[in-house]
Each structure stands twice: as structure tokens, then as C-alpha cells.
Image (cartoon, helix red, strand yellow):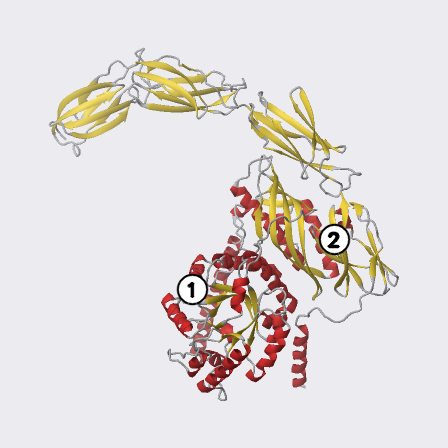
Amino acid sequence: MAIKLNKTLYRTVLIATFVAVNALIIAGIGSVLAFMNTGADRTSMLHLEVPMADVYKPSLTWIDTINPGRPMEKQALGEITNDYMNAWHVRNIAYKKNDPYGINDFYTDSARVRIFENIHLNKANNNWFKRTTLKHHTDLDFYSADGTMVVFKDFGVEEYQEVYENETLVLTEKDTTSYQVMMLLEDGFWRIRHLKEIPTPNDTTQTKPRNIANKLAKTRNIKGLNYYPKDSPWDTFGKKFNDSIINADFKIVNKMGLNTIRIFIQYEDFGKNNVEAKKLELLKKLLDIAQNNNIDVLITLFDFYGDYDVSNWTLTHRHAEAIVNAVKNHPALLGWDIKNEPDLDFDSRGRQRVLAWLEQMLINIKKWDTNHPVTIGWSAPEAATNLLNNVDFVSYHYYRNIDDFLVAHNTLAKNINNKPLVLQEYGISSYKGLWNPFGNNKEDQADFHKKTQRIFKEENIQFMFWTLYDFNKIPKEVVGRLPWRKKVQEHFGCIDKDGNLKPSFQQLTKQ
Amino acid sequence: MKLGLILALFICIGCTSKKEQPSKNVQNPKVSLQTTQTNFIAGSPINLKFKTSNNNAPLKLLLKNAFGSVIIKKDTTNTALASFNIPKNYCRLAGNLHWKLLHQNIPLLKGKLYIETNTKNKTHVETYFGPRSITAGYNDYSMLTVVPTDIYDNPVDDSTQVTVKYQFQKNINETSLNTNNFIAWYNVRSTTKAGRILVTSESNGTTSKELTTIVFPSNAEDFKITASSAHNYADGNQIITFKSNIIKDKYGNTVSDGTLVNFIIKDEKGAYLNTVGTTISGIAETRTLHPDYAAKWTIKAFITGAAESNTINFNFEAAIKDYPIQFYENNRKLVIGPFKSFMKQLVPDGILVKIDIYDKKGNFIETKNTTTKNGVSSIYLETHYLPNDTYNFKIKAAGITKEYTKDLYGN
């Protein structure tokens, strides 16, 4: 018996070993073959195409391409522009990481040495730089007959740079510089050969004067709410976009005696730097419906965006530019709220970094749209004095004890140079249940709104409450995954999940 | 103990969060720039001196030029004069050099220096020349672009003089240019004679290397062709040669070797034959086989898109005047030939013989092809394909058609 068992055991072990050894051999051969087949695609030698993601998109305009050498072709101009931008980008990244990666592709032998020397110095001193450029105005001087050399001037390059020493931000600086550039076409890449700073001519472009008085006057009379459709909170322009639902909602808003809504545009949802035309159509549709219902719309840009990194500035600029230019002439547009509660990112991203991003964005939007006021939706009255001189009206949110509200509001009101002040978000959840047994019920919510409405009326305070509906599903990006937070967030509305009016509805409706 | 460790860990995590710029109140020293010179020549050492009220103040200097930025520390300690030695690579790049004096990360002073191109020392001359091949005539040109730089690779200032020399055959020309936008450029015009043009340039005593562009002959002009052969019998064996005269462009240059010449042959039935030759020393030559039946050829040659030749004719006389046909083995074996050529010699192998077979009602059945060997061709008609019956045969060879009606029988 024992011998027999032994025999079976031996057999099993032998067969198993055999199979295992074979499997190993096959796996080995396989991985050798796989290794032999990997590596660069042979066509890559030709540099036929270097697919690059959109990483660097400052605004660049060619003033003209008239030159004595050779007529500029559209194709070549596109390639030159692209590689010139790539050259700036790889240099920015090289100085950020003190790593010359990519420099060889966009600088000639003699030019790249200059960058390497700089990296070497900065590495030794532990300095690094976050740089970006915002604007280029290029003007062609010369394009050679064989199409392998260009010389052009790049006027008024707006550069922004953050200087770091170890981990400390030393300085941020912004300047406008002009350059003369020579690029050579070498094995498929346009590479920078010479880059020389030249004097910047006086900017003679006429800036259109801003005309925001009408819209700004409206902000002194805001009675409104923050709007999301019932079934698609934080996703107004998603798959569930339905103009008849929005129309019905706006009719309710209008009937309540409110004149303004605040909507949100999610950065990624709208396609980042390549804003989707489809989304812009939906946005216009929403504005049309608002116009038909006599409602002004405050658009909040950059929801769910929290990077602010200098490397991505140009991408966010292209995002905002596309949206602003698409709807800036719409009569229903009240103004631009650059960012929802950016002060909450101060700790994680750095106050200076966030403020620098906001400041630049305010400048840009004021330039793109000269007819609408701009603001920032600060999360607390204390934060609302940031960038006071850059915004046209001040917005803040208040979710703390209502008894302390008036003091906080009046303190802020004294410190904002008489600019219009809007309580842009406030409200109270009517959730009382398992996850929040000591919360407020619907009656408490109604009391709250009764009280606040009285204060607003007495003190002439402009308000936008949160929000029209109770929501079924709160995305995790809003309050996280914790059920006691989600549950509370679901019940801020004055109409419940089934469409029934809550007691607070009556309080929020103009008597 | 464990709790302590965890606590320590938390404190560590707390500490590693990003530091903000401290907004503490620092006492900034009073500083003023001592160095008065603001213009320097590339490569000369630059030293910036500041007078400071606090000898030990940790002053730093932020520099920025077209290629990048750097922060440097002062290289004197405990003196009322803070001096900064600008790094070599910043002294060498011509253009503006911006500086900011920092104390505890707060900029106290800022200014800029201008670094001029170093014209005193040797100049480097970089030249780009292209396209490197052009065609003769008055329209084409090669562009010479000259980029003089100073010893530190800074492009020279505008209006620097550059001399361009170019040579063609016995002529050497010289012209003087001024740089503008880093460069000076000159269009070297093509000549009417084909050949090489050599160019060179010179600036500030430095000459560039020699560069060449090749002037290729321009497009061919119309030309003449001739045909020649040992005889004009259509024997399907001899080779006929077509030849052009020396093909030239309109300036009298012989066209480039390898110019493709298409010879198009049209016979009296309107059928086309094509043969191609390439030129050597301007002459294109090509050959083709004689037909095996009498034909009248019209030949014309083309250089596609450029030129054409005259039209010539070549007539072939029939070499085979007639041929016998014998039927054997119940008329199932056909022996065609012997074929005899113009001197009664047997024709070379490979004359095509074509037999069209029809049934007695005149319906076409099939075509059989064969070729001659030793002057004769034979063919056997199998019973499988042609059962016993009466058939009509049309035999075509050497342009001569013969017709027979025969009964096939036997097996």
C-alpha cells in the first residue's frame, strides 16, 4: 500500500515538475520573443509625426508672415509654431525639474548648452523655477528659400515665473519681454538656434474699455439660488440635460420671485483646454431658457478643478477663453464667478499659488469679456477680502450659525470699498435621521429661511440660497464618500426628492 | 510607547506639508547699487556691488536672461559692500540681463544690464546654403544665408558687414551685405550654363567654408530621332535601334544623363508599342524586336512634360511569303511549315502560329497557339476535344491566313 502510494506520489511529482519546467521554458521563450519585438517603431527614425498631448497652449498670434525670403506655407507655419511652443514647454519643464529631458529635440547643439549650464547652476544651488508664458505675438522676419530656417520676433511675451529654493517659494515674478528667435529645421524638428532678448515696443493695441455698469447694478439687487437640476446635480450639462426640465425649473424660480441663478461649469466635463462645442451649445440653450424666464445667470467656472499649477495655466486659460467667448454676448449672462471656494485649496495647494492663478484668470476674463463683472465665490466672509481690488463684486458663502451672520457680514461689508456684496451660497439641510439624529427637520429649515429672509430684507442683503431641490445622488467629489456627509448634502433643497414643496419653499417665495 | 510613535509620525506628516512664504516682519537693510556700469561686453567678467546697512544681511541676487534664471549668493562676508560675481554663462550671453536683489525672499532693488556682442574677438561665420541643386536659366536660385556670431555664439548686431564671393567657371563675383535680424542673405542666381557654383562668405576677417550648388541643365528642347536596323524584313528576329540626337536645353546644355525618353510606336492598325531609353551624354538609345509580319511603323519620342521628337516611319517587308500545311493521321495532325525567310533560310524558332477552329455551322470552338521549332510547328487534335466531324480551320502565321475545311475521323 505504502509502496503504491509512494509510486503515485512520485508520478504526480514527476509529471507536475515536467509540466512546470515546460511552462517555464515556454514562458522564457515567450518573454525573449516579446523583448525582441519591443523597442522603437522603425518609422520613428523619420520623425514623421511626434504625437504630443496638448500640454502648452499660450495664446499665440502671428502678426504677419511677410518676409523677403520665401512665402510662408500654412503647413510649415503650423509646424514652426508648434515646435516653438514645445521649445518653451520643454525648457519650462527642464527648469522645474532641473532635468534636461526633451531639450535636445527643440534646441540646436549650441543653444542647448546654455540651458544645460543653467540647469547645472540651479541644481548646485537647489533652485528651481516654475515658469509659463501667457501670450506671444510673433512676427516673421525671414524664411529661407529652402525652407529650413526662420527668423522671427516674439513681441510682448508675458512670462510668469515662480522661484523656489529647496521647497520654499522665494518669489513670483511676472514680466513682459520680447525676443528674436532663429530656428532651424533639423531632422524633422524645428529647433531654436538663437534666442535673444530685444526691447519691447510700446503696446499700442487699444484695449476696449470695460462697460459693466449695467450688469454691476443688477448685482445690487440679486435674489437668487444656486441651481442644479433635480436628477443631475453637479452634472447640469451631462447626458441627462433636458431643456424642458430646465424650463420647468426656471418657471418655478421665476414664480418664486427670484431673479438670478448661479450655475457651475465643471472643468473636465467641458473638455479642459479643448472645450467641446456640444457642451457650449447646451450652455447657450440654458442661457436662452433663462432669458425667456427673465432670469440672470452667474456662471461659475472651474468647478472640480484644483490644480492651479503654473504648468497648466495655459490650458486653463484656453478653457476659460472658449467658454467666455462663446457666451459673452448672451443677454442672460450676469457675470463670471471664476472659481467656487478657492480658499479651501489654500492649505493643500498654497495660498500664493491659488491667488496667483486667480489673479491671472481675472485679468484674462476681464480682457476677453469687457461687459460683465467678475467675482470669486469665497467659502467664508473672512476670505472674501482676497483680491478685493481685482473683482468687481464680492461673493462669499456662509454655512455657519445664522446668529453670527450679521456681524460677519457687516464686518466684511465695511472692508470692501463699497463694492457690491453678495451672499452667494447659504442654506441648511433638513436631514434628521440615522446619520444625523440631532439635525434639523423640514420645519427647522423653514424657520431658518424665514429668519434669514427677514434679515436680508431689513439689511438689504443680496442672496443666493442653496438650493432648489433635494438631490438623490451626491457625487463623491462634492463631500466625499462618508454617508453622514452625503445624506446631509442631499437635503438642502426647498423642494423634496419627489417634487413636493417643503415648508421652506413658502418662506423663500416672495410674499 | 506605540501611541507616542504614532503621534510622532503624525507630527512628521504635519511638518512635511508645503511651506508658505513667511510673511513675518523682517527688517530689510538699506541697500544701494554701487556699480555704475550698465553696459558690458560679452565675456568680460561682471561684478555687481551693493552698499548695505547690514553687513550680515543674507542678500541674494536673482538673474534672468533670455535663456533662464539663477539665484546667486554674495561672495563677500561681513562687509558693508555686498558683491556678486555674475556666473560666466550669464556674462557671455548678449542681450539684457535682469537682476533683482533679494533679502529674505523680498526684492529690494532691481535693474538690468546690457551685454553687448563681443565684436573685438574672432567672429564665427555660420552659413546655410540651399537648395543645393538648381536648374540653368534665369528663374532659379540658391539662397546663401550667413549668420555671423561672436566668440560666445551671440549673433552679431544688425548692419555688420558680410562679404559674399561666388565663383562660376572663370568668373568670381563679390558682393557686400549687411546683417539684419541676425542674418545676411544673398540669392545666388542660376547661370545659363550648367556646372557648379561655389560660394563663400567672410565677416570680420573670418571666412566660412566653401559651399556648392550644382546648376543642372534646364528642361530639354525638342529633338530628332532616327531608326536603324540590319534589314527591314519582318522576320521577328532582328533588332531595330532607335536613337536620338544630342538632346539639349534651350541654353545649349546637354540634358542630364539619365533623362528618360519614351519612344512610342504606332503601327498601321493603330496598335501602340512602347520602349524607353535614358540619355547618356544627351543621347537616348533603345531597341526593340522586328515584327514577324509586314508592318508600317510610325515612331515618335517624348520626354514627358518637356519635349518631343520628330515623327519617323519604318516599313517592314514580309520575310515569309508563304508556308505549306499538311494534314496527317486522319487529318488530326497538322504540320505547318517549313517557314522560309527572305533568303529561303529557315526562320528562327518562335514564330507564332495561331489556329482558330470552327464547327461546320461556322461556330467558333477554340484557338490553339503554337510556335515554330526548326522552321516547323505541328499540333495534334485530340478526339476528346474534337469528336469526329467536319471542321473549319483558320491558320494565321507571319501575317498570312489560310483556311481549310477537313473531316476529322479515327481515334
Give the structural element (helix, strand or loop) at label 1.
helix
- On the image, the x and y values in percent for residue A116 come to 70, 52
Task: Using residue B231 as the reference point, say whether residue A125 is left or right of it.
Answer: right
Residue bearing mark 1: A291
- On the image, the x and y values in percent for residue B365 come to 17, 31
Residue bearing mark 2: B98
Task: Using residue A199 as the reference point, say whether residue A85 is left or right of it.
Answer: left
Q: Nearer the viewer, mark 1 or mark 2?
A: 1
User: Residue at the top extreme?
Assistant: B343
User: Residue at the right extreme?
Assistant: B79
Say if residue A157 shows up in the picture: yes
- On the image, the x and y values in percent for residue B98 come to 74, 53
Crowd band around label 2 with a 10 angstrom C-alpha radius: few (<14), some (14–19), many (20+) = some
Give the structural element (helix, strand or loop) at label 2.
strand
Snapshot quadrant of residue B84? bottom right
Say if residue A336 shows up in the picture: no
- On the image, the x and y values in percent for residue A335 come to 52, 64
**Residue A124, placed above or below residue A112:** below
Residue type, mark 2 in image:
His
Task: Using residue B296 as the reference point, say whether residue B172 is left or right of it.
Answer: right
Closer to the camera, B138 or A451? A451
